[in-house]
Image (cartoon, rainbow, N blue to C red):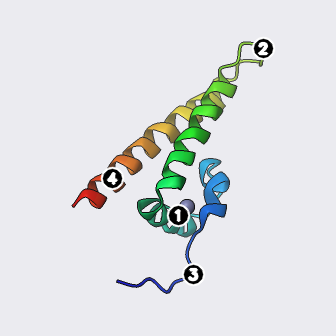
Amino acid sequence: MTNLKAPASCDDLVAYVDGELPPGRAGDYREHLKGCDRCRERVVEELQLSAQLASLPGLPSRPGPLLWVIAVYLLLAAVVAFALLEALW
Ligand SMILES: [Zn+2]
């Protein structure tokens, strides 16, 4: 199976984690995640890092961003789980 569409790449990782990719591009990147173990690991790492940064005691507590990080993290965990399931099939 070939995919000739110029795809989302590993370069989209940070924008994806930050929620800055437009919806179509985010979908492309999720497709990329299915085939890119490195990105899957890095996305999880980035999200964990964001969560840790958001929970640092020295920073002013702003529930909005933290809730956003948690929501993205849960969404991504679901996406990764789904991608892994599909890969195993
Ligand atoms: Zn990648």
Q: Which mark is residue 76?
A: none
Amino acid type at image mark 3: Ala
Q: Is residue 26 above or below residue 79?
A: below
The N terminus: image quadrant: bottom left
Question: What amino acid type should be assigned to the residue bearing mark 4?
Answer: Leu
Q: Calculate the distance from the C-alpha at mark 2 to the C-alpha at mark 4.
A: 37 Å
- Disc 2 is placed on an element classified as loop
Residue wearing tag 2:
58
Looking at the image, is mark 2 or mark 3 nearer the viewer?
A: 3
From the image, state whether disc 4 or disc 1 is nearer to you. Answer: 4
Residue 60 left/right relative to 69:
right
Q: Which residue is at a point 60% across and 48% down the rendered structure image? A: 17
Where does label 3 land, which residue?
6
Amino acid type of the residue tagged 2 in the rendering = Gly
- The residue where tag 1 is placed is 29
Dot 4 falls on a residue whose secondary structure is: helix
Q: Position of residue 68 (x, y in %)?
A: 58, 36
Q: Real-space Cα distance between discs 1 and 2?
A: 34 Å
Please give the name of the residue rendered at 52% of the width and 84% of the height, measured from the top-left corner: 5
